[in-house]
Image (cartoon, rainbow, N blue to C red):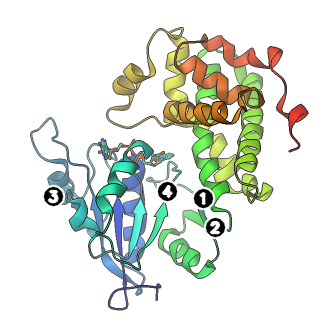
């Protein structure tokens, strides 16, 4: 039985219902109906919107069992209940799965103060993959001390086509999931500039090195081995080959930097959110505040390109005039 379970069974609520949020709902719901320690029903908080048909998204999800906007063509499982009322969605839950674009988390957490059960456990899904079609994929659950809690989450997510591993390195896993989106922007720029696979591989290698160095500078507890888990190098590869950050950055470079990322996001993603550009700005602020900009030329350059201070081509030029990270800090 999960720690803190109500009436002996854990109740799961998913806070978020975008593309990855809907995939998570499907995965979890397929497990809760099989596992006795969980309530069958999975509640999914939906940021309500009106569809072009005039219907509310949450009504359509409950009627069709499909998130027609963010995960069309995939049945979520009849035990998934869409709920547009955040407070109501979380009130009985003792396991919360947070999966909204990160810019909305602050507002959501403020609304949740005093509204969740005292013994609630929570997990943040910082990564996602093309698994809705039930093709083999992996994920990593980070935990601090209590391996039993981590294993409970592993049990909730694992399916024959989705392999989940628990790793004792919360910060390392969080930072992998966050920083890889910045590297994916760089990879997309290289694609848009049609510079070929060798250049893209070099950018990914330098990006991974900067991911590891920044994570370790920020948190000395971060483990090298985390970068070899699925949250590290594997997620970096998948994001740089096929993700939405890569795709929009490619279009940005093809436009010669003349179209803004905001315009391209609205045009190309139909409501889905781009995380890499926002993350690049946040990373830039941290680097600038700590006086580390020169140590992380790839991260800094991605931000400077995204705000129009440098042309897209600068993504392959920075190393010529900025010091190399390996000369400055031991990795
Ligand atoms: N989908 C993936 O494959 C994938 C990959 C990597 C990481 N992730 C992570 O998962 C998280 C969620 O991504 P997603 O793919 O489920 O979402 P998404 O980008 O597909 O959809 C955007 C979501 O944001 C909601 N939204 C819009 N305005 C909002 C507001 N003001 N307040 C709250 N919500 C609002 C929308 O209703 C929608 O559910 C992100 O942190 C993302 O980095 C997802």
Identify residue for label 4.
125
Q: If you read the primary sequence from the N terminus, does the residue marked by circle 1 or circle 4 appear first?
A: 4
The CA span between labels 1 and 4 is 13 Å
- Residue 165, which numbered label? 2
Residue mark closest to the camera, 3 vs 2:
2
Do callouts 2 and 1 mark residues in contact (Cβ within 8 Å)? yes
Which residue: 59% across, 82% down? 148
Tell me which corner region of the image, top left, top right, bottom left or bottom right, holds residue 315: top right
Which residue: 32% across, 35% down? 271
- Residue 179, which numbered label? none
Q: Is residue 272 above or below residue 169?
A: above
> Taking the image as drawn, is residue 241 in sight?
no
The CA span between labels 1 and 3 is 31 Å
Q: If you read the primary sequence from the N terminus, does the residue marked by circle 2 or circle 1 appear first?
A: 1
The CA span between labels 2 and 1 is 8 Å
- Residue 138, which numbered label? 1
Q: Where is residue 119? Give x, y as percent.
A: 41, 80
Q: Where is residue 20? Give x, y as percent.
A: 42, 51
Q: Is residue 135 above or below residue 187?
A: below
């Amino acid at each position: 039985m999960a720690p803190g379970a109500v009436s002996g069974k854990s109740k799961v609520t998913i806070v978020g219902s975008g593309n990855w949020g809907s995939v998570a709902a499907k995965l979890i719901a397929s497990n809760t109906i099989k596992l006795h320690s969980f309530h069958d029903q999975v509640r999914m908080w939906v940021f309500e919107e009106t569809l072009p048909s005039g219907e509310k998204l949450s009504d359509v999800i409950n009627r069709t069992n499909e998130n027609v906007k963010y995960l069309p063509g995939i049945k979520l499982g009849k035990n998934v209940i869409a709920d547009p009322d955040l407070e109501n969605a979380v009130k009985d839950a003792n396991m919360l799965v947070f999966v909204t674009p990160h810019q909305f988390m602050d507002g959501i957490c403020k609304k949740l103060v005093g509204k969740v059960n005292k013994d609630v456990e929570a997990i943040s899904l910082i990564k996602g993959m093309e698994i809705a079609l039930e093709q083999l994929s992996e994920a990593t659950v980070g935990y601090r001390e209590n391996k039993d809690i981590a294993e409970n989450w592993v049990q909730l997510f694992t399916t024959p086509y989705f392999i989940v591993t628990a790793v004792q390195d919360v910060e390392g896993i969080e930072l992998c999931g966050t920083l890889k989106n910045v590297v994916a922007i760089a990879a997309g720029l290289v694609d848009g500039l049609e510079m070929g696979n060798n250049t893209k591989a070099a950018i990914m290698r330098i990006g991974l090195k900067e991911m590891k160095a920044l994570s370790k500078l920020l948190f000395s507890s971060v483990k090298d081995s985390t970068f070899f888990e699925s949250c590290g190098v594997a997620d970096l590869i998948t994001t740089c080959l096929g993700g939405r950050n890569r795709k929009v950055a490619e279009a940005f470079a093809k436009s010669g930097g003349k179209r803004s990322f905001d315009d391209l996001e609205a045009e190309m993603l139909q409501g889905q959110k781009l995380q890499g550009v926002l993350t690049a700005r946040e990373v830039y602020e941290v680097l600038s505040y700590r006086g580390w900009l020169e140590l992380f030329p790839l991260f800094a350059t991605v931000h400077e390109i995204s705000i129009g201070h440098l042309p897209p081509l600068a993504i392959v030029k920075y190393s010529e005039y900025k010091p190399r990270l390996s000369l400055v800090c031991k990795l």
